[in-house]
Image (cartoon, grey):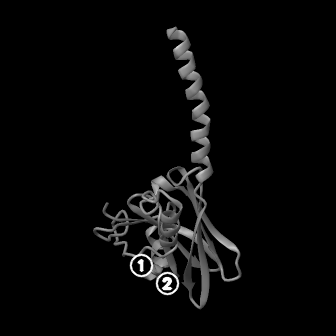
Amino acid sequence: MRMILIAGALALLAACAPAQEADVMSEGCDARGVGAWMVGEENFSVEATSVGPDCVRAVATLVIRNASGEAIWADARITSDIMTLAPAHDIAAMNAALGEWTTNSSTIQSTSALPEWPANADSPQSGEFPFYPSEGYTRESYSAMRTANDPMFCYVQGMESLSCVTYGDGGIEQIGLQLFPG
């Protein structure tokens, strides 16, 4: 008798499990946010989308398009790894969070405002909000970037950091990370 009850209970659980999984999967997290980035006289668009079985397990993509609509930068992240996206557990909250993600998250708007890299220092010096140049930058190339005064766009890329890109000489590149206390 016990075996029949256990077998019946297991059959009932098996029958219910796919339905619960299907309910979660059908909700999805197809959300979108759009922002702008002024690059000189040109208005670039910044688009963010999320896709996933639900917003907790979604992947978000950030795309920057130049004034003619060409995608010039793209980055994909797991939403639970992004400070501003992780709390968004439904589509309405994710739409709002993605809208926020498409705005320039740094007080530094151009490369000339980046912190100085003093002689004999290992990296730029900026106190509580350190900036770490991407691999390959030397003190000299970093100083040249600061002198160029190119527009810069930063977005939250983790729980305690911003990824910063710059647009100059007709192209876009990631120039480093700015940490913030968390």
Residue 63 percent coordinates (x, y): 61, 68
Establish if 8 lies above or below 135.
Answer: above
| Residues packed near mark 2 inside 10 Å, few (<14), some (14 to 19) or many (20 plus) | some
Which residue is rendered at x = 51% and y = 65% of the image? Answer: 92
Front residue of 135 and 107: 107
Give the mark toward the camera: 1 or 2: 1
Label 1: element kind? loop
Q: Which residue is mark 2?
A: 149
Relative vertical location of residue 77 with respect to residue 70 in this rendering, above or below: above
Residue 28 in the figure: left or right of residue 162: right
Q: Amino acid at mark 1?
A: Ile
- Amino acid type at image mark 2: Asn
- Secondary structure, mark 2, is loop
Instruction: Name the foreground residue: 41 vs 47.
Output: 47
Label 1 – label 2 distance at C-alpha: 11 Å
**The C terminus is located in which quarter?**
bottom left
In the rendering, at what x and y percent does residue 35 appear?
A: 55, 77
Q: Is residue 28 left or right of residue 80?
A: right
The image's mark for residue 9 is none
Q: Locate residue 78, reporting x and y percent.
A: 52, 53
Q: Residue furthest front?
A: 1
- Crowd class of label 1 (few under 14; some 14 to 19; many from 20; radius 10 Å): some
Residue for point 61% across, 60% down:
30
Q: Residue at x 61, y 39 (%)?
A: 19
Report which residue position mark 1 lands on.
Answer: 108
